[in-house]
Amino acid sequence: MSDLKEIKNNFSISSFQEEKLKNFILELKRFNKHTNIVGKSTLTNPWKSHILDCIQISSFIDDKNSSILDMGTGAGLPGLVLAMVGYKNVNLVDSNGKKINFVRFVCNKLNLKANIFLDRIEVLKKEKYDFLTSRALANLNKLFTYSHKFSNHDTVLIFLKGKTVNYEIKEASKKWSFDSEIYQSLSDKRGKVLVVKNLKFTKWQKSYQ
């Protein structure tokens, strides 16, 4: 439970929010026994692999009324974790019906408010958000393709990435213009938090649309 202690020391969560997080982990373990929605190994220490990994995104989103789209949310990670710690305008999209069923179940069970979409990101209604988040969905080029229609000049993209992040940035730079900062993940020494601003098509990419 040392990772819960680290979460409480580094993030301002109330006892009410802590209880929601505990119940979320409980339901995640129960659901995963009959329906595989997260890797079994990640449930050995879910406070680290899921909660700490996801809650660190909150360090980059000061306003809890900000609109957030969690692309490829899976089991609600990181979007549901943000909703559990007080973010009020969380939107979750995934095309996997079993995972969305879990997300809906948890929202009902824990009385969480979130907009849930069972859909492919490519066909989701075009809308602009303050923040876009994603974890283990796709490489950066693809994430930017998904993100562009949901972004305006103020939108910030926050992606949980792995050890290939620098290579992905290099490849994405061939097609996109953007500003990025890389932060060390708190949950995994191999992990990174990538924060992207000012995403734009380059002239090269525009000519091939």
Image (tube, helix red, strand yellow):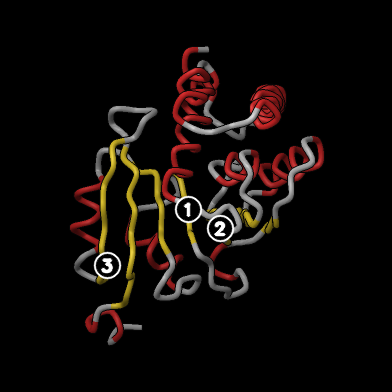
Q: Which badge, 3 or 2, comes first in the chain's sequence? A: 2
Residue located at (25% from left, 53% from top): 168
How far separated are the C-alphas under marks 2 and 1?
7 Å
Residue on which disc 2 sits: 68
How would you rate the neighbour count of disc 3 (Cα within 10 Å): few for under 14, some for 14-19, many for 20 or more? Answer: some
How far separated are the C-alphas under marks 1 and 3?
16 Å
Q: For residue 133, which numbered disc appears in the image?
A: 1
> Is 56 left or right of 43, judged from the image as shown?
left
> Is 170 left or right of 139, judged from the image as shown?
left
Across and down, in percent, residue 159 comes to 40, 50
How would you rate the neighbour count of disc 2 (Cα within 10 Å): few for under 14, some for 14-19, many for 20 or more? Answer: many
Residue on which disc 3 sits: 178
- SS assignment at label 1: strand
Vertical arrangement, residue 158 with respect to residue 150, above or below? above
> As rendered, which of 130 and 25 lies closer to the eye?
130
> As rendered, which of 152 and 60 lies closer to the eye?
60
Q: Is residue 34 visible?
A: no
Q: Is the C-beta separation of discs 1 and 3 under 8 Å?
A: no
Q: Amino acid at mark 1?
A: Thr
Q: Amino acid at mark 3?
A: Phe
